[in-house]
Structures are given as C-alpha cells and as structure tokens.
Image (cartoon, coloured by chain):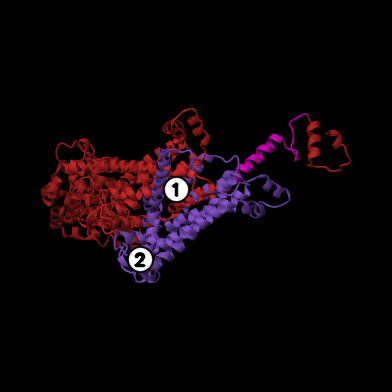
Chain colours: A red, B purple
Amino acid sequence: MAETAAGPDQFTGATPDNALRNAERADGPMLAADGTPLKASLARSLRRQKIRAFLLVLPLLVFVLVTFIAPIVDMLWRSVENDIVSETLPRTVVALDGWEGEDLPGEEVFVALARDMNVAVERKNHTRLGTRLNYETTGMSSLFRRSGRGMDEIGEPTMEQFIALDAAWEEPATWVALMADPDWIERQAEWAAAEDRGAEPRFRLNGAVEAALPQTADIYGAFARTAQVEDEDSPTEEEPWPVVYQALASDLAALEALPEDLPADTARLLSQARDAIAGFTPEDVRAAFLDLNEDWGDLEVWGTIEAFSDPLTAGYFLAAADLQLTPQGIERQPEDQRIYGTLFLRTLWMSLLITGSCILLGYPVAWLLANLPMRTANVLMILVLLPFWTSLLVRTSAWKVLLQQQGVINDILVWSGLLSDGNRLVMINNATGTIIAMTHILLPFMILPLYSVMKTIDPSYLRAAKSLGATNTTAFWRVYFPLSVPGIGAGSILVFILAIGYYITPELVGGTKGVFISNRIAFHISSSLNWGLAAALGTILLAVVLLLYWLYDRLVGIDNVKLGG
Amino acid sequence: MSALPPYATTPQKIWFYGFRVICGLIFFFLIAPILVIIPLSFNAQDFFTFTPEMLALDPDGYSLKHYEDFFTNNEWQSALWNSLKIAPMATLIAVALGTLAAIGLSQSHVPFRGAIMAMLISPMIVPLIISAAGMYFFYSRIGLQGTYTGVVLAHAALGIPFVIITVTATLVGFDRSLTRAAANLGAGPVRTFFKVQMPLILPGVVSGGLFAFITSFDEVVVVLFVGSAGQTTLPWQMFTGLREQISPTILAAATILVSVSIVLLTILEMLRRRSERLRGMSPG
C-alpha cells in the first residue's frame, strides 16, 4: 500500500493515504483520516450514532411518559396515598399519638379536634374527610357533617366570659393588636389606606406573643390565614372563632409573664384577663362534643381516625382484599360486605371459561385453515379477520340483539318448536351472556396465533406417524398436538389477559351476575367516587396482567405478537 | 386433508365431513352476529328481530328510516363528527412520533432498548380500564380531563404501540446500505429519509396508521373517562344507546362501522400482498 501512495498526489492534510502514511511513520496507534487515533474516532462516531438514535426515540418517549406512564404512576400512588386525615386534622393526629384505644381519648384530644374542625369547617374540608372515613366506618360522613354545624358552640361559654369581663374582647381590632406583628399592622394600615390595592399583606404573628401564648397563636394564626385565603376577608374585620377564646383561656392559666412591648390598652386587657382567669368556669370540650353528637363517644370512630392518620395507608388494598384496618389490627370484613374476593374469583373463573371455549372453538378452525390449500384458506381467513376488525361495540350490540328474550335466537328456537313461547331462554344480563359474547369477541385472538404455529408443523410428521402404524388418534395426540402446544399457550395467555381486563362487554351484557372486576373499578371512579379503592383494585389487576405478560414473554416472546395482518 | 382419498373408509368419510360441518358451524358463529345486524338495520319497525314481513321478503318490511335517523339526529351526527375529529388527529400524532422512534429503535446501539421498547408497548398491554382510570386521575390533575386535547393525547398513546410494532417489523427487511448509498451520493439525512427510506417503509407506516386509526375510532373505555359530553364519540354514543335507551339506530350505525372495517381490511390486505410481492414471495 505504501507503493501506491507514493504516486504523484500532492494533497496535504486529511486524506486516507496520508493517514496511512502517518500511521506507518509514527509507530503509535492507528490514525483516522483526520489524524486522530482510529479508536477514539470510532468511539466518537459510535457515540454520535447512539445519540442520534436516541434523539429520534426521545420525542415519543417523552410523549408516552407524560400521556401514559405518568397516569399509571398516579394511579399506583393514589392506591396508598392518604394524607387527608393528617392534613385536615393535624392537631388531633398529634394529640392522638400514644392513645391506646382502650378508653375514650382525653380532653386534650377533643380540644385539638375542636380547633381542627373549626379550620376544616371554614375551608369546607370536613365533609370530604367524612366521606373518606365513611369508606372505612359507616356513619362517619354524617358525624362530620352534623358536627361541622355545631362548631360555633365550642368555646362559646369561654367567649361569653371574656366579653363579660370587657366588651373590647368582642372587637377584631383587640385581637389584631394582641396577636399581630407590629410590622404587619403598619403594612396593613398602609394597604387599607391605598386607593388601588391588591391583596392584603399576608398575616404575620407577633413573635413574643407566640412564645407566651402558644395555643392561642396557633389557632389565631390558622383563623387569620383562613379568613384571608378562604373568605378573602381581613382578620381586622372578623371576630375570631369561639375556640380561639378557649385557647386563650388555657394559655392564660399557664402564663408566667405577660409578653413585653404590647400596646398599653392590650397589656391592660390581658393582665386583667389573667387575673380573672382563675374565676372562669372551665369549659369541658369533650362533654360539649358528646353533647353535639354521641358518636364521638364511640371508640370505633376514634379507632378509625387513628388507624388512618398515617399519610400512607394500606387501607385501600386491605379493602380490596375484603379486609379492614381496625384499632385492633387487620380483620376480615363482615360476611355481608365481602365482595371483592368473590369478584376477583369470578373474573378469573369466567376468563378461564372464555379461554377454554376459545381453545375448543379455535383449534379445529386453525387446523382447517393451516391444512387447506392457500387460496381457500385465505378466503376463509376473511371470516376470522372481519370480526377481528369490526368494532367491539358492533359485536356487543349484535349479541345484545341476538340473545334478548325477544331476540333472534329465541325467535328461531320458538319457531322451530324446540322451545315453547312461555319459556324463552334468559341468555343476557347474566354470566352466560358475558361468556358467549366475549368468546366470540376474543376467538380471533386465539385462532391467529394457533394458525401461525400450525402453519409451521410439517404434515409429513403425521404421515410418518401413520406409516409407522399409529392410528389417527394416536398420531394426533402423540405427534401433532404436542407440536401445537406453543400456539395454544400463546393464544390462551393472550385471550386470558384480554378477558380479565374487559369492561365494555360485561357492562352491557353481564347484568349483575356477569360483571368483572373492571366494572367495579369503573363504578368506584364514576359513581361511588372512592378513587383510592378504584386505584387499589386497578393496581392488583395490573399486577396480575403484568405477571401474565412476563410469562407470555418467557414462553413466546413479546416480539412475536402478530397483528393478524 | 386437502381432499378425501378414494380409498377412505366410511368412518373416515364421516369424520372428514363431520369435521368440516363443525368448522362450518364455528365460522358461522364468528360471522353470523355481524351479518345478522345488517338486514335488521333495514327493519321498517322499531324491533330488534325479524318481522314476518321481512322474512317474507316483502319490500314494505324494509326501510331506510334508521339510516335517516342516523344522518339527521343531532346526537348521532355530533358523535360521528367527534369521532372524525379525534381519530385522524390521534393517528397523525401516533404515526409521526411512532415512525421516528421506530427508525431510531431499529438502529444498532440504542441505549436501554429493552426498557424503552417495553415502555412504548405498554399502552397495548395494560388493560384499557386501568389506562382509563390512570388517565382520568392524572388528566384531572393537569386540567386535560374533559377536553378535546386530552382525548386526542390519550388515543394517540393507545395507538403508538401498533405503529411501533408494524414499522419496526417493516424495518427488519430494510436494507441499510441503501441509506448509506444515498448519503454517499450527497443526500442529507432528511432527503435520504423522504426519498429513499420512507417510500420503502410506507406500507408498514400506513398499516400502523390504520391500526392507530381503528384503535381510536373504536375506542370507548378511555374516552368515557377522559372525555366529557362534548367529546361523545360514535362508540360512546352506541354504548349509551345500548345501556339506556336502546334504539334501532344503533344497528344502522353498526352497519356503517362494519362497512368501514371491510374497507380497512381490504386496504390492509392489499398492502400485505404488495409488501410480500416486493420481498419476492408468492402472493398469498
């Protein structure tokens, strides 16, 4: 090669010949045309190819991640997510920590509940929480709804005593002067004076007062924020909730020294109240709650709140398995409420039946198609592909028409005299209807993989078996059938996976006895609005399907999925 | 099995014909439900069964009134238009993104190929009710639930696996030296793609597109959850019709859908034959 390159080429720079010459001169690594080492050059171009291929895939990958994978992850998350209790009743959850569940929680828990409920009622969260807890213990929904209306009464006796002491306690301004940061008061005043004003400055607590009156600061802060955010009102205009007075009373009873730097009026009011506090009739919040609704004395109610106070819960999965979380641990649901076990079993059982009947009907047809001459087989194939391509709803409506009591099949049976007009068969809105219609709908998914496997079985095997003395039956069972088993496996798994996730057909022809787990998922999403339970049922179904697909991949390989084309 | 040998014994003959009768019955089971609704859709009465006039082939027993209803009734018309607005858009997105990705995936040295492929195929594997539930939850969070965009995106996601599978399958038979030759002759990557690669893989792209189209056009579970009343599609309208107020117009709609399937099936079959001819195989 050196000889050919020694020709009259006057090129300098990166030419292949020069590269080769360089490579030979320098005793180092082989160089590419541009003088870089060949290894590095190859690695770079490989990297560039990889990046280019990846960039082609990237848009779709992002698209599928956002439109499909994220929703699935969202569903998985919802099946365990449970921050509603700890978000709606944060103080109660903390106070309940360490409660043994043997007797009614103490006064401090009820005080915390009163404060949480006041906030929740203002934010209209308490009914949502009631609905959520009602999935676990019936009666919680109405308990929360009714108690919500009575929240004004808790703290009221204390409030009246404060006002009796000095009417100034009734004024929002008194409270602002006591609780708010002086800086905030100034900015609020500026804001109120301004002509063209935006939102009111966010309320800030006075740090010194917060340290001296922690409970009051906590609940008054929540009150001020709620007033600003939910009601778009100002704490300077609104009278605090009665429960704030109750908090102030219990803070004052424990107060050691008055906070400093308070305006003179406020300091006077506060010290007057502190001196009077010993003479106040103490309020029994627990009794007030029990008076409001006796269910608050029910240990089950408290057990439920305690059991679901974690931000993550296994409760939905337990419900999906007919179990429930109680203060005593995990227990089975009462007999009459165990529906999911039956439903899962029914889904599996009916899917198996459908798969079985698909094998029974699909096998002879696939055999015939694989053994007929090409031209005839192709014509008959249309009879398989046309249903395959026809809309699912068309086929379901066809079965609805055929199977009705006044439908075509019953008419034919009556007309032919096989059936008297009085006892027409009930074939729809029950399990029979679902099985017939779904076998029809899924049959092509069995025939197509069976056909493609049978196509590869050499007919001479059968002839060889027969010439060696096997009867037709033996030849079939010992030679042909074992060879066709991969096709049966592929078709069965495919049909089974499709069947257990079916929704439309069972919904339309299944009545109540022929519905699947999917119908229950749909029910929880759109009717009962128990999304967490729907998500848990969906997660279980997804796990089963993925497990089956993994099996399918091991047995057949996902890449071998044929689309009937 | 192609023909009965002349020396066949009587039991063999019985088996031979018996087997064919059984297969004939199964074929009948497959096709009859679809064929039965066609004459029923011309019923002059509002019944779901054959009237005596129909059986006597009396012209008075037949009418086009259900088709008239289909083409004049507002609900059915808006459902038809919604379907025709959603399916092509979803197909377009699925085909454009899917073809690009399939070309990327068919190159050697794609990092994480298995994982990417599994992710892209997953919309076909996950049962529709689960996809629908997840999309309902997630799309409500991001404000896409009940919008046209939401339904189109959801349907595009469902159609993508079909595009990926068919286009990847076509690319297996694609000779990569052709693109190298084009590049060697001075064509840029874009020109190579449209002038050399695209015409050759077009049948795969078209049949992938047909699959994506029919997926969206027939889809009802996801649209039930992700859509709102403004996105009622044809299958959705049929679903409501079957569940609530069962009217024979459904049969007219069904017949029209069957005709659509026949057209699509024919196009696919023609494409299949063409690609087999191109590969030098005998036409099936």
Examine the rendered structure and indicate whether residue B54 appears above or below residue A176.
below
Query: Secondary structure under badge 1?
Result: helix
Q: Quadrant of the N terminus of chain A?
A: top right
Direction from residue A70 to residue A121 in the image, left or right: left
Residue B123: which disc? Answer: 1
Category of crowding for the residue at label 2, using alpha-carbon neighbours closer than 10 angstroms: few (below 14), some (14–19), many (at least 20): many
Q: Amino acid at mark 1?
A: Pro
* Residue marked by disc 2: B249
Instruction: Identify the chain of the residue marked 1, using the numbered disc in the image.
Output: B
Q: Which residues are magenta?
A: A27-53
Tell me if residue B106 can be seen: yes
Q: Nearer the viewer, mark 1 or mark 2?
A: 2
Q: Amino acid at mark 2?
A: Thr
Task: Give the residue at x 32% y 53%.
Answer: A204
- Location of residue A146 in the rendering, given as x and y in whole percent from the top left corner: 17, 54
Tell me the subunit letter for badge 2: B
Q: Tag 2's secondary structure?
A: helix
Is residue B145 in view from this perspective? no
Establish if B41 lies above or below A103. below
